[in-house]
Amino acid sequence: MAWEEDILGVEFQSLAFRAMGADGVERTATLVRFRPEPDGGAAPRRQRPAVLFLHGWSDYFFNVDLARFWNSAGYDFYALDMHNHGRSLRPDAPGGYVANLADYDAEIEAACVLIGGGAPPPPITLMGHSTGGLVAALWTARNPAFVARLVLNSPWLEMHGSSLVRRAASGLMAPMARLRPEAVLRLPERGFYWRTISSAAEGEWTLDDRYRPPMAFPVRAGWISAVLAGHAQVARGLDIPVPVLVLLSSGSATGLLWSEEMRRRDAVLDVNIIGARALALGRSVTVERIEGALHDVFLSPADVRTDAYARLARWLNAYGAGEPPKPEGPPA
């Protein structure tokens, strides 16, 4: 295995690797790292704390400003494109599919070993967005020795409405997930969130449709059943021992029809139920509600991003690794 120049340019490198899951299945994932030095990071580096970012469902890592923020804050930045996503997509595999969220465990642990140069590194900062936030929280609960702090960007911790909706959906999905796990569910397609972020529509971010399709990957029975099972674990309480930061929009706009509110709200999740469920994550949880934020708060309009980065920097000053250098400020 060798690091190669990444699709994001010379400052980024990526490494595809395979990890054997507890179920005996070997899966491909891709680790991306930010190396702003002119030599691409070949020269010896002083030891710095590391942060590992997990993307959301039907997504991949592309936010270079996020990497630059963490670098300026004194961290080595890494991101993992998990199996069946982004750089790790394979032609014969169903995009975005996983039958059990624990199937990600082996590749996350392997990524940590790669970050450590062949051995587990000192505890890292784990960051996750949306479904990646759910995965990050569950993995931290199972592997607390690997994680020093947890940052969750609009984590998908519960279904819309309440746990009653989740229980009803779980009962409906269970038979199909058991008998036909890769069956595609016929659900309304909504590209509203993509519309607000993609430069191909009305947003400002360059997205590769091969890695992040505008209408997302097909929703499959086994996948939604796995997510519902993860929600149930969160609802029972995870007792995460490390500090947790949860960043959320101040409001949701999740209707079936386009609304201008979707430009300044979370168009994917019910942020009120997510905020309430966040309190079940662990012993020290900070919830930041950000006015005008999109589903990914760090893809929001520039003034909102500035607010979000400032809140993250403030939290790191309180819970960061020792006394890291103060960030130079959020990307413009």
Image: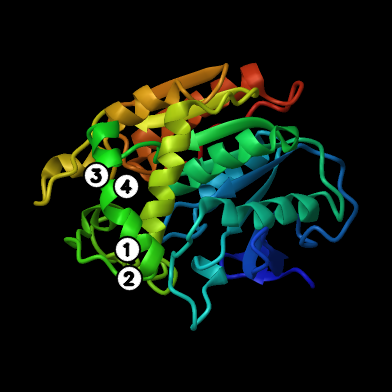
The Cα–Cα distance between marks 1 and 3, rounded to whole angstroms, is 28 Å
**Is residue 42 in sight in this rendering?**
yes
Image position of 49 with respect to 91: above or below: above
Q: Amino acid at mark 3?
A: Ala
| Residue drawn at x 71%, y 28% as measured from the top left | 325
**Label pair 3/2, CB-CB below 8 angstroms:** no
Nearest to viewer (mark 3 / mark 2): 2
Q: Secondary structure at mark 4?
A: helix
Residue type indicated by callout 2: Ala
Distance, label 4 to label 2, CA atoms, is 15 Å
Q: Which residue is mark 4?
A: 170
Residue on which the image places disc 3: 267
> Are the residues flagged by discs 2 and 1 in contact, CB closer than 8 Å?
yes
Question: Element under label 1?
Answer: helix
Given contact means CB atoms under 8 Å apart, are the residues at marks 1 and 3 in contact? Answer: no
What residue does disc 2 label? 183
Q: Residues within 10 Å of mark 4 (few under 14, many from 20)?
A: some
- Of labels 2 and 1, the one closer to you: 1
Q: Position of residue 60 (x, y in %)?
A: 49, 60
Please give the residue where the numbered disc 1 appears in the rendered image: 176
Give the secondary structure at mark 3: loop
Identify the amino acid type marked 1: Met
Residue 68 locus on image (x, y percent): 60, 45
Separation (CA) of disc 4 from disc 1: 10 Å
Of residues 9 and 213, the one nearer the viewer is 213
Q: How many residues crowd around disc 3 within 10 Å: few (fewer than 14), some, or many (20 or more)?
A: many
Q: Residue sitting at 64 percent across and 52 percent down?
A: 105
Q: Residue furthest right?
A: 44
**Is residue 123 shown above or below 6?**
above
